[in-house]
Amino acid sequence: MDNLNASIRALRSKDNIEANLKEYLKCSEERTMNYALVNLALHCVSLAEASLEGFSGNEDISEEAGLLAQLGEGSCPDTEKIRAARDKNTARMQGLTDDVDIYAVNEYVLNRLEHRFRGDQDPGEDYTDQGMTDELLRFLASKKDEAQNLYTVRLIEQLPVRMTRNRFLEILAERLTVYRDNDQASFDEIMMLLRSAACLKEADNEELRSLSQALSSLKDADADEKVYTAAFNSLTEISVSLNGKIDFFQLLQEVLNDLLAVSLTGEYINSVKQKDICLNIVREAAEVLLKTRDSLSMEAINGCGKLEGLPEENIFLFREAQGFRNELMQRYLMTVRSHGFKKDFDVLRQAELLLSGSYFAALEEKENEDLTPEYFNRTVAEFLQAMNERLTGVSRRYMRSLMARVFTVLPPHFDSQEALETYIYDSLRSCNDIAEKTGCVELLHQIMAE
């Protein structure tokens, strides 16, 4: 067992501060290395298996695989190269997130066409708009505050959207005012989500891009069963490809996070008893990713068995060490700075983020900037203009689907139960497309049945 707890007790007694800070940092970085390297090996196995299944598509990951191969051969890769690979994959995942929003908009369109060809263009002989409104309100009333808010957003997304473009833009402008008092980082984050939901960029996926172009210009009179079936089949194939890629590149992000944590604490790699097992697994996984090996060896597979249970042990030790970090940093700030320990404390801070499960966490320390009125007004105006242009020249059905998607990020505000009831009822009542209403009601019931 290491001397972490002994060093903590000594520091709390202010005994030999410099030596015990050094011992705390050594123990903490060793624990970080043990947790990160075992995690890396196990995540590499999953990544290699996903690669063999073809989930990476045609994406070139030779750079990332090369970094893993370097570690597998016993040489720790350059930290900055790992950071660059991580940033690249973060951007790649943002593109996939954008595609998910575009996929959802197209799915929305097809869900509201489906009942036109299913032969059940009727929400039920006992159906009334007021009855459905009451049912939704009773459902929401049965949920506690946080769940109620989440379900309200989900239900609003599935309601028929019946409003003019100008009214929609007015609602967005009004709702965005609640972010005036936020810091700039929080405001930028909500704007990033809005831009993605608004589908302001074309899809990276070629098939999805083609489908979006077809559906966005599809006139109701041309939406026959043949067109619907072809679009539905295309969307199904896109779903398989998109989900596979998301799973693969999220797993790649985990691997890069583990690898960066290993690189940051590289001088302690020999403290890992299972080092040779881990490095062999990493090396073979890299070879699979580079397509110089078509499967993992039995030695690597058996090695995984020898690592079983270690992540659970290591995470406890890792978190125990991290739990003292802020306390010691604040209590001995002058010593930390004067003796050059700040870099080591920053390694622990970054490692905590990398191994926290927040795959895309920003690692840089930044002070929160105030959101200036000029920045807020300019950003909102630019977004509303882009949103208006996005809604221009598309079919009415596609425009409504875009509005519904944006409402998942920034839903209308209801200052009373009566206002919510009015919105739900008016949305249902104003929908004269029986097939669309039937589809909406079916989706609403599915949400309530979860």
Image (cartoon, rainbow, N blue to C red):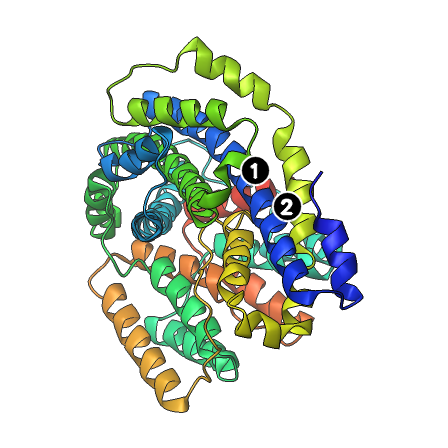
Q: Is residue 360 above or below residue 38?
A: below
- Residue hosting label 2: 318
Q: Are marks 1 and 2 in contact (CB under 8 Å)?
A: yes
Image coordinates of residue 380 in percent, x first then y, are 36, 79
Q: Which residue sits at x=27%, y=61%?
A: 200
Secondary structure under badge 1?
A: helix
Q: Is residue 153 above or below residue 224?
A: below
Give the Cα distance between marks 1 and 2: 9 Å
| Closest to the observer, 347 or 170 | 347
Query: What amino acid is labelled 2 in the image?
Result: Phe
Q: Which residue sits at x=29%, y=49%?
A: 81
Q: Is residue 67 above or below residue 72?
A: below
Image coordinates of residue 323 in percent, x first then y, are 69, 56
Q: Which residue sits at x=37%, y=75%?
A: 169
- Residue hosting label 1: 34
Q: Is residue 94 left or right of residue 271?
A: left
Q: Is residue 232 visible?
A: no
Tell me where residue 107 sits by quadrant.
top left
Q: Which residue sits at x=54%, y=47%?
A: 355
Q: Is residue 205 left or right of residue 110?
A: left
Q: Is residue 37 left or right of residue 89?
A: right
View extreme (top): residue: 298
Query: What amino acid is labelled 1 in the image?
Result: Asn
